[in-house]
Amino acid sequence: MGTPTGLHDPRVRGRMLAAAVLASFVSFLDGSITNIALPAIDRDLGGGVVTQQWVVDGYLLTLSAFILLSGAVSDAFGRLRVLRIALIAFAATSLLCALAPTAGVLVAARLLQGVAGALLVPGSLGLIIAVFEGPAQAKAIGSWTAWTSVSSLFGPVLGGLLVDGLGWRSVFVIGLVPAAASMLLLGRVRDEAREGPAPRIDLPSAALAAVGLGLLTVGLIEVGGGRDAVLPRGWAIALLLAGLVGLAGFIARDRRAAHPLVPPALFRTRNFSAGNLATFFVYGGLGIGFLVPGLYLQQVLRLPATTAALVGLPATVLLILLSGRFGALSGRIGPRVFMTAGPLIAAAGALMWLLIGLGTGQAVVVAAGTVVVGLGLSITVAPLTAAVLGAVPEAESGIGSAVNNAVSRVAGLITTACAGLVLGGAVSTAGFMRTAVVAAVLLAVGGAVSFAGIRNGQRASS
């Protein structure tokens, strides 16, 4: 079998990049591939818009709640060890989703799947930060960003083919393939010995974050659930407010904790704080912007799942061709211009969706707007990731990655939970047009934050 290989062995860098990409691909793919299957799940298991929201947000909720904790766990116990455990757990929960007999069981399985998914992204991105440095690191992050972003847009295309050909349950099985490939690529490579004491984990902060996000999500979904809501409106509002209190408690606790879950010192770096604020608005806009079009094309225009998914294929091609290049350019001239222009271009694409109100060529309008959104996304994501993680010392790359991914997932979680409010309780042309405006505003604010806050050449001191 040979001697286990060390993490910094030059011979394994390519393998580690491929393993990190595939591990993240699993998580991002699952987050996107499910969207196109929502109408089929509703037809089979019932529950309307509320169930559709919960199938998406059940995963995002636990992923967002535990991703901060997973960053600390990854730094404390080793990126490779945690990554292997996460891949096994994700495969097991994916099978549970595929076998779910009711909507309630499916949502419960999605909650468990989110916990496993929370361990994947920080560990994989932290692995890249540990293995690469300098311009090679920026290029590696660009490749990681390109392929994980592709999974977010390629997922619906693959999902449409699977739903139409094999049924919605197959979308949860397909993730086993990249998970198994990632495990094979990791092989016997092991973590390097850690210098200094392992970081301690603040469990009360993690509990407050999880409870706060959970209550906030339930409240938002139920407030906008309309006739499909389970709770009375008063109770839903009370839960929403309780969630806000819980999140405020998390912030207060984390600022006082001896071993904070999110070290406040990270936010003293301008690019880290501004980059995460931009992340919140950009991914909030993308969260609702990529959920509703697929529902509209299937439930209003009555297109098959595969046809609806193919609408986003040109955007996927743009991401494959351009994300790595923009990541490399960002490494040479700085991220600010890309993080400003990209979201503004994506916002223009979202506003193009308003042309569906003309009543003709609506599928073409959705496709054209999606292409422009994809162009803006390909300009944005690699420079944004490089700017945020470049502001974090390597020893804290796990928690830095976790914070940034938590921000992006929480943003998507909140805007997805608000989808019922924006749509008015049901998918319609008017609701989709409202969604387009909301997405465009959020994306434009993300670009403005980047212009005002990001500085080129700002790097962390190790």
Image (tube, rainbow, N blue to C red):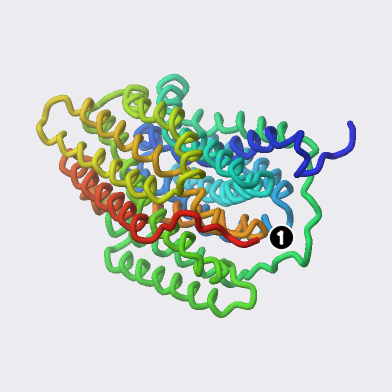
| Residue at the extreme bottom | 256
Determine the residue positioned at 41% across, 26% down: 317
Q: Is residue 128 left or right of residue 29?
A: right
Determine the residue positioned at 46% across, 48% down: 334
Determine the residue positioned at 67% across, 59% down: 395
Q: Position of residue 289 (x, y in %)?
A: 31, 43
Tell me the quarter of the image containing the C terminus.
bottom right
Residue 100 in view here? no
| Residue at the extreme right | 2
Q: Position of residue 23 (x, y in %)?
A: 61, 39
Q: Is residue 369 left or right of residue 266?
A: left
Tell me the quarter of the image containing the N terminus.
top right
Q: Position of residue 210 (x, y in %)?
A: 51, 63
| Residue at the extreme top | 165
Q: Is residue 209 left or right of residue 128?
A: left
Q: Quadrant of residue 175?
A: top right
Residue 31 in view here? yes
- Nearest the viewer among 424 and 362 is 362
Residue at which label 1 appears: 76
Q: Position of residue 273 (x, y in %)?
A: 45, 63
Q: Is residue 6 left or right of residue 140?
A: right
- Nearest the viewer among 431 and 146 is 146
Q: Quadrant of residue 275?
A: bottom left
Type of amino acid under label 1: Ala
Secondary structure type for disc 1: helix
The 10 Å Cα crowd at callout 1, few under 14, some 14 to 19, many 20 or more, is some
Above or below — where is 247 with respect to 429? below
- Nearest the viewer among 330 and 378 is 330
Q: Quadrant of residue 18?
A: top right
Determine the residue positioned at 65% across, 41% down: 87
